[in-house]
Amino acid sequence: MSGFILAPSAKGDLVEIWKYYAIEVGDVDLADRMQAEIFKGIRNIARNPGIGHFRRDLSDEPLKFWRVRGYLIIYRVKAKPIQIVRILHGARDVAAILGKN
């Protein structure tokens, strides 16, 4: 299995996702399960870096997107190992966050 690295922004996203479910929703078990599901998706991407889709409408960079529940795992497939750039909820303005012109 090839590996992956988490960019600092992706690490921050994971912390914020966990905090949202643990604090805002008030369910630590749900926060842990969501984080586990996201990591399962990341491991799936690492094993199969061809999965996902390029979204030129959301990023000027050649990034791929893979959905886990409502979250988009955004990664650089050409990096070795793959680099997880962001983990964002699909309801957010992803293009603006990624700096799409």
Image (cartoon, rainbow, N blue to C red):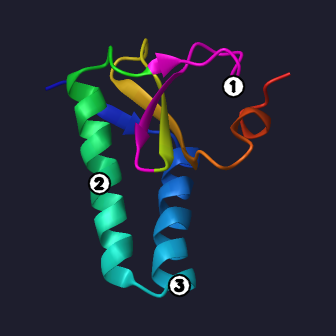
- Three-letter code for the amino acid on which mark 2 is drawn: Glu
Q: Quadrant of the C terminus?
A: top right
> Between disc 3 and disc 2, whose residue precedes?
3
Describe residue 35's horizontal placement relative to residue 60 as left or right.
left
> Between disc 3 and disc 1, whose residue precedes?
3
Report, in whole angstroms, how far the alpha carbon at label 3 lies from the one at label 1.
30 Å
What SS does tag 2 mark? helix
Describe residue 61's horizontal placement relative to residue 11 as left or right.
right
24 w.r.t. 57: above or below: below
List the residue tagged with mark 1.
Answer: 58
Circle 1: is it few (<14), some (14-19), or many (20+) Cα within 10 Å? some
Circle 2: is it few (<14), some (14-19), or many (20+) Cα within 10 Å? some
Q: Are marks 3 and 2 in contact (CB under 8 Å)?
A: no
- Three-letter code for the amino acid on which mark 3 is drawn: Ile
- Please state which of residues 33 and 81 is positioned toward the viewer in this rendering: 33
**Residue lying farthest left?**
1
* Image spot of residue 79 (x, y percent): 42, 17
* Residue 101 image label: none
- Please state which of residues 91 and 6 is positioned toward the viewer in this rendering: 91
List the residue tagged with mark 3.
Answer: 23
> Between disc 1 and disc 2, whose residue precedes?
2
- Three-letter code for the amino acid on which mark 1 is drawn: Leu
In magenta, the rendered stretch is 53-69
